[in-house]
Amino acid sequence: MHRALVPSVICLAGLIMLPLTSQDAPEPLPDHYTLGPATRDGIGKFYMGREIARTVSAHAIGWLERRDREGEEKPSLVMENLGLEPTDVVADIGAGSGYFTFLLAPLVPEGKVISVDIQEEMLRFIEAKKKLKKAPNVEPLLGTLEDTRLPEGSVDLVLMVDAYHEFSHPREMMQSIVRGLKPDGQVVLLEYRGEDPEVAIKPLHKMTRDQVVKEMEAVGLKLVKSKDLLPIQHFLFFEKG
């Protein structure tokens, strides 16, 4: 995804993190971003008071696909509470290994799941898994740092699971997501709870509810529902304001 400026990678709570990259070098920035000293797990780029976290690389597929994820995070509860219709078009943004993509696919048998990532290695893994699981309604899509490339007005629900905090261009990515939503579409975010010190995830890979709401409001999304069901994550629903 990124070209490394240094050869080392960083391991965080079992995840392989991409090293500092050319994307982290000083560049002309829109007013909504600032630059500063990078912390261990960040890129030195700040958005609305939050340092953006480094991105998990494709080397972390094993961790993303771990067998105890259901016990730790209860993704089955997420599926049960999304309220999907069989004909819905769903976008899994920052899909990674496609763990959630292939939980979503059986729920929309007459629709599809657009599985978006910016790492080709992740999409190759998803394509192979699509064939293995015989899931024809899964559509891998290569995005960019600034654009999901979702077709305008095409998506009923966007799901982002522990991914948004790593977007190097969160404002632009969210604007592309909003463009991709149908008029009554929803954005659902799962993020590790930043308010909870008991959640054993590095601080930059967690977000507070207030921070999520502030950043979604900046692109015209309003919080319409919050479900307190998950052991360690926020489960937040947004719609166009």
Image: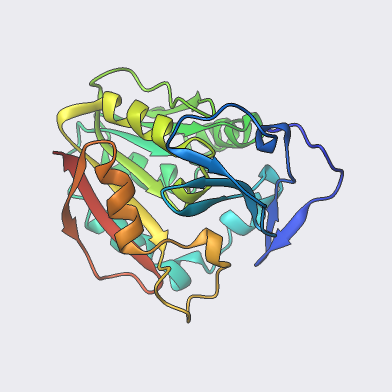
Residue at the image point whose x is 30% and y is 61% from the top: 210
Residue at the image point whose x is 29% and y is 45% from the top: 216
Residue 30 pos. (x, y %)? 47, 29
Quadrant where the image shows the N terminus: top right
Residue 84 showing in the rendered view:
no
Q: Residue furthest top?
A: 151
Q: Nearer the viewer, residue 136 or 48?
A: 48
Residue at the image point whose x is 39% and y is 46% from the top: 160
* Side (left or right) of 76 relative to 125: left
The answer to which image quadrant residue 185 occupies is top left
Residue 241 pos. (x, y %)? 13, 38
Q: Considering only vertical position in the picture, is 141 above or below 75?
A: above
* Side (left or right) of 127 relative to 194: right
Q: Residue furthest bottom?
A: 198
Residue at the image point whose x is 28% and y is 24% from the top: 179
The answer to which image quadrant residue 212 occupies is bottom left
